[in-house]
Image (spheres, grey):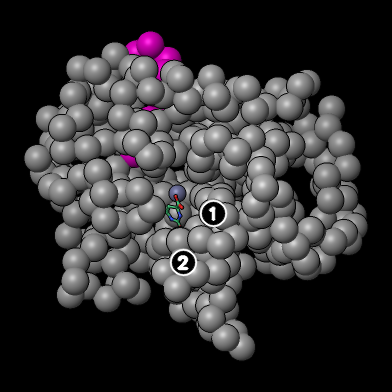
Amino acid sequence: MQLITFRKPVDLHVHFRDGAVLEAVVPHTTRQFERAIVMPNLTPPVTTAALAAAYRERIMAAVPAGADFTPLMTCYLTDTTCAKDLIAGHRDGIFAAAKLYPAHATTNSVHGVTSVERLDPVLAAMAEAGMPLLIHGELVHHDVDIFDREARFIDSVLAPLLDRHPDLRVVMEHITTRQGAEFARSHGDRLAATITPQHLLYDRNVLFSGGIRPHYYCLPILKRREHQLALRAAATSGLSNYFLGTDTAPHLRGLKENACGCAGVFSAPVAIEAYLKVFDEEGALDRFEAFASLNGPAFYGFAPSSKQVTYERRNWQCPAVIAAGDEEIVPLFGGETVHWALQGQA
Ligand code: DOR
Ligand code: ZN
């Protein structure tokens, strides 16, 4: 297949940041995606509808003229989230969903949730309102190995949470393990998972190939090959429980190439191309549209795009760095050959 045409995709998990980085990265997402679910882990975090509405304005100001793009905002849950404000924000069309970061699990999660049980009244209100809960699913505890955090979270936090809230709709964000892939399809259409390009492309060995490679460091961390293969099978299965969420997470180069480097892979400039590489290798290009453009909208309850995009099999060189103000961000595939290219849209 030399050309592939599908409905314009939706990215169900992006980090846009703010300021100069926001301005630099938004056009990369709007080039390929019609909508995106925007993560709220700014400093300070997006914890109220007013903060989200203001952030949405700043994002829209960074959308290039002529681009048709809708950011869908999320609320950062904390130990003190007010259910009434949250549900009002959802009803008013500001919040598409709420994001649960366990405290200290990842970038800007210090204000995250310390006890999921104590959040139960908020989760009950979300279930009643039909508002999806998006979860960073890692059990962060000093005696849980970093490679086991996801599986331990599923058993000790997520499974009980789903039992306590049978009507709550949940997205397991950026799953990274066989256990995550299996669990995501175990609760019918109320549970789903996003999968990033890097977790489909690589296993954990890439973090240490010839030396330490900070640009592959993200959270949850890359896992063993067996998990990568389970994720590839899940993404290409066509099942509606799996959909595209890049977790594109830009950090300035100096903050990645650092003695204490930040977690995150900036994949927006090559996102669809990266997923197409995987689907092509798996002989599953015919299932790409479900993963990229249909399953996510169906879960969230909005219509898929009415536009079609066409990608062609053509080699091009991804720039080694992308400018952000006076600084640089290293993208996924930076300096490498990319095998698919956007040809056009109709
Ligand atoms: O690698 C990651 N980067 N994982 C996350 O959960 C957050 C993200 C970020 O915001 O940088
Ligand atoms: Zn993320």
User: Amino acid under label 1?
Assistant: His
Q: Which residues are magenta?
A: 91-99
**Quadrant placement of the C terminus:** top right
Disc 1 C-beta below 8 A from ligand 1: yes
Q: Residue at x 26, y 49 (%)?
A: 110
Name the element at disc 2. loop
User: Is residue 236 placed above or below 323 in the rendered structure?
Assistant: below
Q: Residue at x 30, y 29 (%)?
A: 47
User: Amino acid under label 2?
Assistant: Gly
Residue 141 in view of the camera: yes
Name the element at disc 1. loop
Q: Residue at x 29, y 14 (%)?
A: 88
- Residue that mark 1 sits on: 251
User: Is residue 171 placed above or below 127 in the rendered structure?
Assistant: below
- Residue that mark 2 sits on: 261
Q: Residue at x 40, y 62 (%)?
A: 220
User: Is residue 109 placed above or below 166 in the rendered structure?
Assistant: below
Residue at mark 2 to residue at mark 1: CA–CA distance = 9 Å
- Taking the view exactly as shown, the residue that stands out farthest to the bottom is 210
